[in-house]
């Protein structure tokens, strides 16, 4: 079989998990536990094997030839508009496909154990597989419209999975919040598609690649900004980030797969894919880079004092996504993709580790009620610690290389402001994650219930999420926590190893920049940012490592012993009022709630009365009333009297005859 | 005084007018039916007259058609009339049968 034949099978990559989802939606309940989980995992692992085959086939082709279009059906053809279902296999899409299927399979495997005993086990895996299918459609699509189908599909699955435990009101609300917030961004996607079609006459990537360069600057910038609005929603950048921390109401594998490793990076993918719109016009790129940098810093500060183990990771994800957009904004697309890949590895490991911890401590998510768990969960702790050090940027782990490259590119692209903000964010990163790792796995044990205190009753409608500011509850456990089976520890360890060695993908030395070279055909025509000298690049590394080390040292000093007093958080105390501000994530959520619930609601009600009731409803009502009146007038004609009808017939005949005679006379 | 074609036409017109007036003015259903018959025959008279004046047999053929249609119409019409009289003994005039009033 030659390479093109293998690549022609790429359509199977999304179809496999889609088939799994269809099977499980129909028979998930009958298959039960754990068969449903294994079916889902198998379907995605099959897709992973196919992705690897496609990768091998792609590597076998010459550099510039590394792109393959799988033609599918025509889908929509209206006038001059044509859009089909086709898949584009190129280095960029296959990188994402490998990420989604690879990390996704591991997380599916983990979920087989994690979801044990869940009442809706089959449905969970059906939706999980559907998500993977939608995500693969999104990244493999060969045009914007099909990508949008995937884009909406992942949004739908995100909603369904956040609200998986729908008996918890908080989970149901969080799902709706995520959906509604993403709607704002999706409007941007639609506007961008209208603009692209208006300017180029087609939504195909191939047309975009040819035509985007000739577009006037205003059009390209408008398209870029509208697309970026969509990315801000999906990838939780500031202004539209507020749904992601709440999305932690979903089961932990969902947080790991959707809200850390894959779906939230869809925005980065879109910017990379649509890079011709961003490249040549500095304004759009600057907006992206600045929003990314601010997101990195502000979300980093918000993560500092959270008390929920998953919320720290959620804000951390937002912050890390900020780095990716920072890189994409300055034009370092390969660095952004590199960051996406390593982030997926270590963040998935962190989330899965957190899930194990939550499980082991009896559904506790409160950092203040953990501590010293490394003694009981040694394997999980190993994976978590490796990922923690990788994320913080300890050399030579993967996060170091990725973060370093992003910051260096920002500086050498001539964006000192963005670089500065990014560097400040490195400090928060070191601080918040070290705090979490120390509070969970090191220091004093705070999870033991004193003897004689009865266990609190379990209420399935109460979510275990802990908001900043709530006092800690009673310690949850009366025995020792213990490590779960290999189904749950293996994925954490594999991902942890990935977090350690992931940097090998793209070492910043000539010949070793494997990923950058690999992605070159996808980023054709993008100017490469190069360091002025090796010393300058090394200096950037030294500065960023020093900043991270300072943060690590500070967190170590504060949390080395855990929390001697459970309700007193040393960092929060030292920050004072600023700590409260951080804890409430700069009060953005509260401000939005106040605005939407107050002035926005009043304005909407006024609009409702003035336009909807006063304008549209009245117009519709007037038309209906007119028809009724006309009918009332006409019904007099239908008298039912035979002789009146006869008179009508006679009068009509006479009139017609008279007309004919008059015309004949005149003619 | 010579009897010309025009006379026949005038008689036809008069008969037609009498029939039309009867249909419009009388309420007895049977009388209405007879008046319709009158109008049809007025038309027949005109047909025959024109057939003779124009020396064209088509007019006479049309008369036969009208006769057939009239026979059918009378059969159906009388059946309806009988049905109406069976239904309502009193008030069986054309104006009483106005169920289809809008």
Image (cartoon, coloured by chain):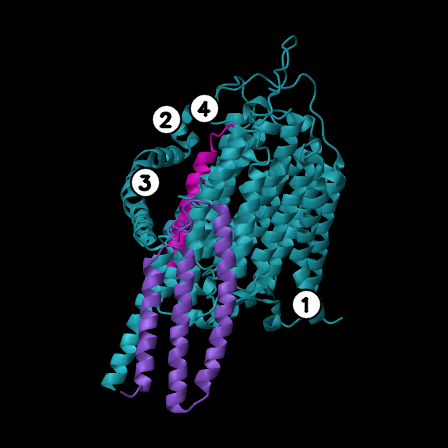
Chain of the residue under the numbered disc 2 shown in the image: A
In the image, farthest residue toward the top: A452
Q: Secondary structure at mark 1?
A: helix
Instruction: Give the mark nearest the N terminus, 1 or 2.
Output: 1
Q: Are marks 4 and 2 in contact (CB under 8 Å)?
A: no
Q: Which chain is cyan?
A: A
Q: Secondary structure at mark 3?
A: helix
Q: Look at chain B in the picture and name its colour.
A: purple
Q: Nearer the viewer, mark 1 or mark 2?
A: 1
Q: Residue at x 62, y 67 (%)?
A: A72
In the image, farthest residue toward the bottom: B55
The residue under label 4 is: A469
Residue A513 visible: no
Residue A374 visible: yes
Q: Could you classify mark 4 by the number of other residues whose Cα lies within 10 Å: few (under 14), some (14-19), or many (20 or more)?
A: few
The span from disc 3 to disc 4 (Cα, nearest Å) is 33 Å
Chain of the residue under the numbered disc 4 shown in the image: A
Magenta part of the chain: A279-307
Q: Nearer the viewer, mark 4 or mark 2?
A: 4
Q: Quadrant of residue A363?
A: top right
Q: Residue at x 70, y 21 (%)?
A: A480
Instruction: Give the mark nearest the N terminus, 3 or 1.
Output: 1
The residue under label 1 is: A8
The residue under label 3 is: A604
Confirm whether circles 2 and 3 share one chain.
yes
The span from disc 1 to disc 2 (Cα, nearest Å) is 59 Å
């Amino acid at each position: 079989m030659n390479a093109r034949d293998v690549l022609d099978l790429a359509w199977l990559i999304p179809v496999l998990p889609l088939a799994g989802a269809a099977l499980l939606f129909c028979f998930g309940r009958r298959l039960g536990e754990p068969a449903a989980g294994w079916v889902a995992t198998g379907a995605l692992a099959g897709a992973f094997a196919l992705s690897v085959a496609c990768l091998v086939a792609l590597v076998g082709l010459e550099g510039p030839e590394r792109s393959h279009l799988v033609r599918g059906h025509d889908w929509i053809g209206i006038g001059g508009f044509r859009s089909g279902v086709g898949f584009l296999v190129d280095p960029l899409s296959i990188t994402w496909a490998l990420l989604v299927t690879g990390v996704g399979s591991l997380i599916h495997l983990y979920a087989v154990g994690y979801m044990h005993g869940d009442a809706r086990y089959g449905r969970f895996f059906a939706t999980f597989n559907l998500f993977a299918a939608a995500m693969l459609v999104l990244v493999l699509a060969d045009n914007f419209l099909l990508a949008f189908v995937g884009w909406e599909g992942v949004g739908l699955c995100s909603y369904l999975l956040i609200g998986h435990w729908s008996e918890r009101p908080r989970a149901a609300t969080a799902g709706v919040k995520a959906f509604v917030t993403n709607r704002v961004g999706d409007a941007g996607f639609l506007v961008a598609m209208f603009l692209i079609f208006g300017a180029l006459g087609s939504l195909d990537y191939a047309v975009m690649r040819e035509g985007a360069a000739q577009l006037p600057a205003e059009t390209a910038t408008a398209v870029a900004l509208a697309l970026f609005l969509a990315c801000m929603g999906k990838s939780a950048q500031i202004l539209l980030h507020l749904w992601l921390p709440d999305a932690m109401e979903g089961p932990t594998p969902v947080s790991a797969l959707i809200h850390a490793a894959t779906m939230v990076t869809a925005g980065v993918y879109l910017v990379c894919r649509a890079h011709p719109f961003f490249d040549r016009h500095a304004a759009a790129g600057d907006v992206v880079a600045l929003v990314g940098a601010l997101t990195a810093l502000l979300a980093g500060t918000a993560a500092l004092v959270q008390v929920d183990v998953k919320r720290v990771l959620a804000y951390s994800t937002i912050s890390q996504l900020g780095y990716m957009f920072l890189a994409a904004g300055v034009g370092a697309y390969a660095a952004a993709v590199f960051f996406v890949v390593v982030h997926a590895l270590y963040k998935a490991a962190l989330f899965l580790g957190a899930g194990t911890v939550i499980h082991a401590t009896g559904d506790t998510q409160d950092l203040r009620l953990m501590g010293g768990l490394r003694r009981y969960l040694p394997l999980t702790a190993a994976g978590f610690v490796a990922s923690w050090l990788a994320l913080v940027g300890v050399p030579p782990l993967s996060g170091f290389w990725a973060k370093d490259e992003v910051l260096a590119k920002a500086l050498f692209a001539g964006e000192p402001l963005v670089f500065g903000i990014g560097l400040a964010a490195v400090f928060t990163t070191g601080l918040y994650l070290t705090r979490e790792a120390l509070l969970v796995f090191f220091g004093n044990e705070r999870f033991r219930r004193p003897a004689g205190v009865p266990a609190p009753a379990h209420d399935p409608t109460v979510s275990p999420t802990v908001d900043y500011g709530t006092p800690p509850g009673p310690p949850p456990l009366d025995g020792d926590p213990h490590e779960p089976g290999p189904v749950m520890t293996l994925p954490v360890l594999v991902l942890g190893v990935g977090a350690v060695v992931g940097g090998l993908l793209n070492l910043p030395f000539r010949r070793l920049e494997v990923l950058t070279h690999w992605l070159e055909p996808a980023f054709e025509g993008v100017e490469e940012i190069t360091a002025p000298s090796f010393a300058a690049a090394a200096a950037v590394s030294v500065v960023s490592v020093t900043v991270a080390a300072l943060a690590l040292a500070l967190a170590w000093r504060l949390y080395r012993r855990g929390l001697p007093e459970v309700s007193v958080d040393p960092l929060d105390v030292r920050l004072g009022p600023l700590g409260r501000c951080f804890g409430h994530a700069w009060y953005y959520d509260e401000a939005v709630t106040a605005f939407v619930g107050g002035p926005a609601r009043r304005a909407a009600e006024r609009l409702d009365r003035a336009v909807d009731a006063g304008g549209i409803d009245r117009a519709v009502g007037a038309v209906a009333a007119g028809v009724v009146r006309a009918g009332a007038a006409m019904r007099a004609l239908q008298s039912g009297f035979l002789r009146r009808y006869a008179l009508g017939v006679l009068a009509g005949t006479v009139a017609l005859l008279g007309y004919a005679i008059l015309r004949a006379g005149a003619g | 005084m010579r009897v010309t074609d025009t006379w026949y036409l005038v008689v036809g017109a008069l008969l037609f007018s009498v029939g039309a007036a009867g249909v419009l003015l009388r309420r007895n259903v049977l009388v209405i039916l007879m008046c319709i018959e009158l109008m049809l025959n007025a038309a027949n008279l005109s047909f025959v007259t024109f057939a003779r004046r124009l020396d064209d047999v088509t007019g006479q053929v049309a008369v036969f058609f009208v006769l057939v249609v009239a026979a059918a119409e009378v059969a159906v019409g009388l059946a309806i009339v009988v049905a109406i009289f069976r239904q309502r003994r009193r008030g069986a005039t054309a104006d009483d049968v106005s169920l289809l009033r809008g």
